Amino acid sequence: MYSKSAAWYDAIYGYKNYEQEAQVLHKLIWERRRSAGRMLLDVACGTGRHLEYLQQHYLVKGLDINPELLAIAHQRCPGVEFYRADMVEFDLGYRVDVIVCLFSAIGYVKTVSRLEQALRTMFRHLKPGGLVIIEPWFSPDVWQPGTVHATFVDEPELKIARMTISEREGRLSRNNFHYLVATPDGVSHFTERHELGLFTHAEYIAAFQQAGLDAMHIPEGLTGRGLFLGVCPAA
């Protein structure tokens, strides 16, 4: 995934307002959760940008499969406990009040069966009345193959051009990202392949319900992609 580009991840996604997104999440959590605690787990936490702000309100922990991103998260949030694990099958040995999985990272499970397994895993880590919040990837009817995308970073000592043409194979979206990175040490070029599953609204809701969660959908969400919420029934 982001193993090659991890060092520049935050620069590439510098356009995101993580503080504002964290504020929206905090409001949703206090409106929807039914458990009394403040322990929050960020699944696929990346470089810890959301946790940087959520830790003001919660006892936060992070989980990601990518060691390069986790190393950055450790530096950003030195007092936070992080785990390297797959979101589909992790076992922390305890339960939390809130689980979030943001910025469409859920798409990396790729298949409906793994989506269902990931929701079951999250359910097992929730306290009664706890809350799961997932920001989805694009649905099959929205993803447009053949679309040209480019992201640029223009800083005094860092220039990045990341380009791709969106592809699709069955229910998988694919981006073969080409990176051109310039620093005072030189110019480098590398590629990364990112494949994410394209799931329908009904498939997300069904995965929540099959896991035992009461599901709901918020159309706008944080970035226009919506949010799926699931509440663990009270004991």
Image: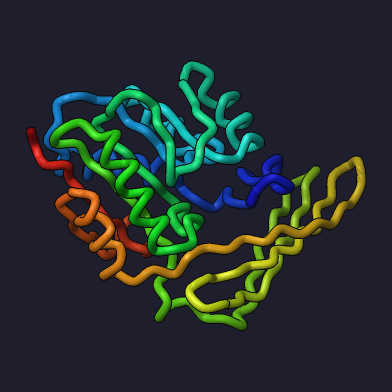
Give left or right: position of 59 versus 129. right
Which x, y percent locates residue 174? 60, 69
Residue 223 seen: no
Which x, y percent locates residue 8? 69, 45
Task: Identify the residue at horizontal 78%, vertical 52% (top origin).
Answer: 159
Which x, y percent locates residue 75? 60, 24
Extreme residue in the left direction: 235
| In front of the other: 165 or 86 | 86
Task: Identify the residue at horizontal 34%, vertical 71% (top origin).
Answer: 200
Compared with residue 172, is residue 155 higher up or lower down, i.e. above or below? above
Which x, y percent locates residue 136? 38, 59
| In front of the other: 154 or 33 | 33
Compared with residue 202, is residue 170 higher up or lower down, i.e. above or below? below
State the scheme by which the image is colored. rainbow
Give left or right: position of 74 versus 63. right
| In front of the other: 184 or 234 | 234
Q: Quadrant of residue 128?
A: top left
Residue 186 seen: yes
Task: Identify the residue at horizontal 52%, vertical 63% (top origin).
Answer: 196
Task: Identify the residue at horizontal 26%, vertical 70% (top origin).
Answer: 202
Compared with residue 128, is residue 94 higher up or lower down, i.e. above or below? above
| In front of the other: 65 or 186 | 65
Q: How many numbered tags mark residues here?
A: 0
Extreme residue in the right direction: 186
- State which quarter of the image contains the C terminus: top left
Q: Quadrant of residue 168?
A: bottom right
Compared with residue 88, is residue 210 higher up or lower down, i.e. above or below? below
